[in-house]
Image (spheres, grey):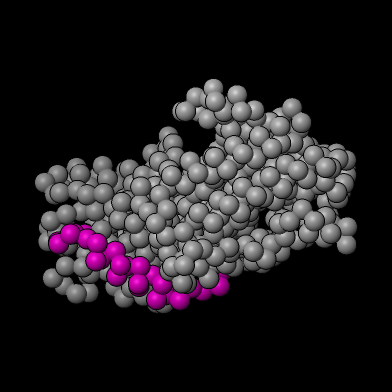
Amino acid sequence: MKYHPIDSQLFVGNRERLAKLLKPKSAVLLNANDILPTNADGTMRFRQNNDLFYLSGIDQEESILMLFPDCPDPKHREVLFLRETNERIAVWEGYKYTKEHARQVSGIQTIYWLSQFDSILKTLVFEAKRLCLNTNEHTRANVETETRDARFIRQMQERFPLHRYERLAPLMHNLRAIKQPQELAILQEAIRITEDGFRRLLGFVKPGVWEYEIEAELLHEFVRQRSRGFAYEPIVASGANACVLHYVVNDQQCQPGDVILLDVAAEYANYNADLTRCLPVSGRFTDRQRAVYNAVLRVMREAKSLLRPGTIWDEYHQEVGKIMESELKGLGLLTQKDIDDQNPDWPAYKKYFMHGTSHFLGLDVHDVGNKYRPFEPGMVFTCEPGIYIPEESLGIRLENNILVTETGNEDLMDSIPLEAEAIESLMNG
């Protein structure tokens, strides 16, 4: 792995927290993600199942984790199954976990090769009353391929039809929403790398630069600092492209007088930062661009103040909408009549600010969590208001990562330049 080793106590503690949520005689089974095909003999780069990583730290394909806290045999209360390596695999694919290394990484002492999974499972499964299996229950997920989880669920139900099956996802959503101190340290490293990439751009962006050249500068900086690369498909959107929310082609030349919207961030050790900044191609914002920029910045600051313990998700977004409504009026984009005549299900401000203000952040960029759960210390959210004006070929979005604390919140990105004046100064310094 590119990233530095992680203290196994993080994963030990995560398993202990999960065990406390399980019903009696529950066995948990988790699979690594598939390696997905592309074309011919090509494959996509492997990305571990985040729940398995959260509970074990194991970052390798074809791995299975079994947790059975009430197992009569103490050595089988935590069991890890790994792909056994050999000389041919070592030549073609390189290093795979040894049992000893996996023990160091995970803190799990009982480790078998994957070829032993069926025989070990049979000795344990009939002692369990409940089998907790994993699925992707993210509300925004749209999965059309059959996952390893889906195949495993079907196989288990066919083999053991009289067992009681339960969903693991709600428990994992509950746990992963609250970040442990070690997780926050890893996330801070992803943010630090992201900041270095962003600062690299401040002396690079100028008229005539291509969007993909900016992307390349970021990728170079991220990877040289032990990141896998981008936390998500980078958005480098100049001019009117900034009004396309998920613009990712990054193939246009940056023109004088335009503003570039950069929604770009690094991952580190599977954790993800999420940053958005806007840069004037010519090094200075016009008066209109600055007015829109500062309006978004004011919304961001007011929204950030609402990210505190006890806040309710829907109420938070409704309040941010009212703040944005006022700013859009000030910019001459909305009139009072627009507001008076608006559809309550699609408020007038949505014409220029059509997405949400915040989402959970962590092992997933749009991390798991329950929107009906009041905000609690340890939760990490993005804060990312934006104003998009296609008729002016201008889109401004600003985004930082915010940790909810006992007394309010902490901006994890407060060292990354944000003020329009600071951006201009650094670009022209």
Foreground of the two, 99 or 48:
48
Residue at 61%, 47% in the rendered image: 299
> Can the viewer see residue 59?
no
Residue 204, given in percent of the width and then of the height, sits at 83, 55
Residue 352 quadrant? top right
Residue 340 quadrant? top right
Q: Is residue 40 left or right of residue 218?
A: left
> Can the viewer see residue 139?
yes
User: Does 291 sit above or below residue 393?
Assistant: below
Residue 326, given in percent of the width and then of the height, sits at 61, 39
Q: Is residue 27 left or right of residue 408?
A: left
Q: Is residue 16 left or right of residue 141?
A: left
Q: How many marks?
A: 0
Residue at 45%, 76% in the rendered image: 7
Residues drawn in magenta: 1-27
User: Does 115 sit above or below residue 148?
Assistant: below
Q: Quadrant of the C terminus?
A: bottom right
Whether 285 is among the magenta residues is no
Residue 181, given in percent of the width and then of the height, sits at 46, 72
Foreground of the two, 22 or 130:
22
Whether 11 is among the magenta residues is yes
Q: Quadrant of the N terminus?
A: bottom right
Foreground of the two, 315 or 221:
315
Q: Is residue 139 left or right of residue 168?
A: right
Residue at 49%, 63% in the rendered image: 408
Residue 140, given in percent of the width and then of the height, sits at 44, 40
Residue at 53%, 71% in the rendered image: 185
